Image (spheres, rainbow, N blue to C red):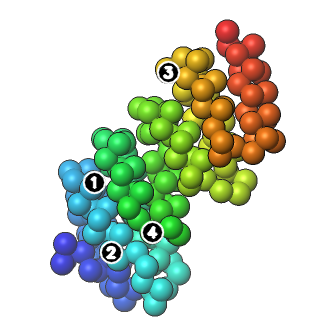
Amino acid sequence: EGNLEALFDPDSPSEVYDQHLNVTREWIGRDAPDAAHFLSAHLDASELPEQTQKRNEMLFQWAAGEWARKDSLEATDWIASLPEGPQRELAWEAAKQPLNRDRPDLGFELALQWSHGPDRLNDLSTSLQATRDRIGPPAAEALLASRQLSPDERSTLQAKLQQTKEENP
């Protein structure tokens, strides 16, 4: 870990940065949870230049996504432990797709909590359709009963689910 400080040093020569980047990629592949924890601890360094911060966010998302691909339930438990804000949003963005593959019903429940703004309806719809396809229509219908859905969201999601059902019976 200590040698990876070059990733967070904007004055690191590019060849040193590239070497550390390759080591980090290997580390993420071998032990994504450990890498995600390390990167999380170094992510909120607001004194870093924007380009360095963006690279670090990319690595953090990569670690979170790799962890979610390997163990989506453990990864989402960790995401839930992150404070609300940019870290959780980055990790959630990386974990959505693997979670919808493994546990789309949980993906829907977490989208209710963690998805906001223009992505919310799309995230809910993706998880709902994956639930229908992987678990079954009754499970998808049960998710629509959530009290956390606004009437407009429920109506839109029901229409999308019906449209998908008609297109792919």
Tag 2, which secondary structure? helix
Tag 3, which secondary structure? helix
Question: Which amino acid type corresponds to the residue marked 2 in the rendered image?
Answer: Ala
Tag 1, which secondary structure? helix
Q: CA distance from mark 3 to mark 1?
A: 26 Å
| First of labels 3, 1 by sequence position | 1
**Which residue is outermost to the front?**
147
Other-residue count near label 4 (Cα within 10 Å), few / some / many at <14 / 14–19 / ≥20: few
Q: Does residue 128 appear left or right of residue 48 in this picture? A: right
Q: Which mark is residue 32?
A: 1
Measuring from the top left, give residue 132's x and y in whole percent.
Answer: 58, 22
| First of labels 2, 4 by sequence position | 2
Question: Which amino acid type corresponds to the residue marked 1 in the rendered image?
Answer: Ala
Residue corresponding to mark 3 = 134
Q: Does residue 112 appear left or right of residue 21 in this picture? A: right
Q: CA distance from mark 4 to mark 1?
A: 19 Å
Tag 4, which secondary structure? loop
Measuring from the top left, give residue 88's x and y in whole percent.
Answer: 47, 62
Other-residue count near label 3 (Cα within 10 Å), few / some / many at <14 / 14–19 / ≥20: some
Q: CA distance from mark 1 to mark 2?
A: 14 Å
Q: CA distance from mark 2 to mark 3?
A: 36 Å
Residue corresponding to mark 4 = 83
Taking the spot 56% from the left edge, 39% from the top edge, the residue there is: 108
Query: Which of label 2 and label 4 is nearer to you?
Result: 4
Say whether marks 3 and 1 touch (CB < 8 Å).
no
Residue corresponding to mark 2 = 41
